[in-house]
Image (cartoon, rainbow, N blue to C red):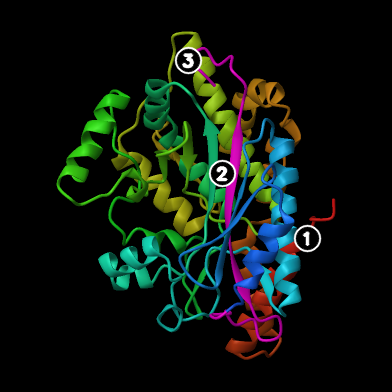
Amino acid sequence: MNRSGTSKFTIGIEEEYLLVDPDTGALADEPSEEILAECASDIDDGVGLVVPEFLRAQVEVGTAVCNSIKEVRAKLVTLRRSVADAAAKHELSLIAASTHPFAEWSAVHHTDKERYNVLAEDMQAVARRLLICGMHVHVGIDDDDLRTDLLNQVAYFLPHLLALSTSSPFWRGEKTGLMCYRLSVFDELPRTGLPSRFESYGEYLRHVQVLIDAGVLEDASKIWWDIRPHTRFPTLEMRIADICTRIDDGITVAALYACVISMLIRLRRSNQRWRYYANMLVNENRWRAQRYGFDEGLIDFGLGKVVPYPDLLEELIELLRPDAERLDCVAEIEHARNIVKRGTSAHRQIAIYDEALKDGASKDEALTAVVKWLMKETVAGLDM
């Protein structure tokens, strides 16, 4: 979208998966490199890419540039199915969850790749703890200053998106009490969290250059904010979300994000804008979404009180309806109601764990039951 919002809409999604043993649920720390090679040979460049991630047990997929929500779903289905099929040929399974329920980060190894070797050396134990997966959504915005202006405004909505995506309630075999523990791990890295505010793209570049000149950064790709201007593509990349176990839930989060961007551009055309709220306030909602998901509501800063999430969601759906109609994704954003009704992956993982314990399972057996549920849910709906 350009400054007037009239250029073609583009979107892309990246997802990160974990490879596990289908019998034990344990993380596969030494998966065959042939899995990636087989996926690469099966996937056309017009669909996307399958590449290694930081850990050997991780696989990342990224769609090609898409022109609609429905197109990005179709390509993501193809990518996820390809990885699942290739893993199965090597007697492994795939899980789409932002943490593994019982894996020990100290027992896994990172991928032998220059970028990852540098990261591991630079960040030490902080990097070694990165046994986490996420979902990143790119929306194309070809005007640099518009992209920077939207970076400032869209942060308000990030906790709303996080609350719908939570899939990381366990860490090292413990129920953490958080719906999204992934951010607790990721926030140990520098240059994470909510973005700083910039008045122009030039100001943003000048700040980045200070760190490059100081030898701290090679480039802006090592700025890992919840949302950031991408370093190589003219996109605004949303990074706060957990990976959704069910693919349609992830598409809903992506559609809501795209519609928020569209809505903010629509306001701009009418010489309006979303009110800027300080990170101090938005961080409170970020924490609430991380801790409770959508169970305990978020703060409405205008009202000055916590409002139940279903009420906020209805307001958001109606606010975004003109944009959802324009982007042909009304059904996708309305699916958010279904997520709230049945719960996110984190809700289901906790319920399965608690039910297994209640039925007499040991803690290890209950955790294994969670992983086996994740295996099934990760590939659910991929034949549609």
Residue 186: x and y, percent? 38, 60
Q: Main secondary structure of the magenta part?
A: loop
At label 1, which amino acid type do we have?
Ala
Q: In this view, does 274 lie above or below 56?
A: above
Residue 42: x and y, percent? 74, 57
Q: Which residue is drawn at 50% across and 22% down?
A: 264
> Which residue was labeled with disc 3?
3
Q: How crowded is mark 3: few (under 14 residues within 10 Å), some or many (20 or more)?
A: some
At label 3, which amino acid type do we have?
Arg
Residue 102: x and y, percent? 53, 80
Chain-order first, disc 2 or disc 3? 3
Secondary structure under tag 3 reads loop
Magenta residues span 1-30
Q: Which residue is drawn at 44% across and 13% down?
A: 272
Q: Residue at x 84, y 55 (%)?
A: 383
Q: Residue at x 51, y 18 (%)?
A: 2
> Which residue was labeled with disc 1?
380
Q: Nearer the viewer, residue 148 or 212?
A: 212
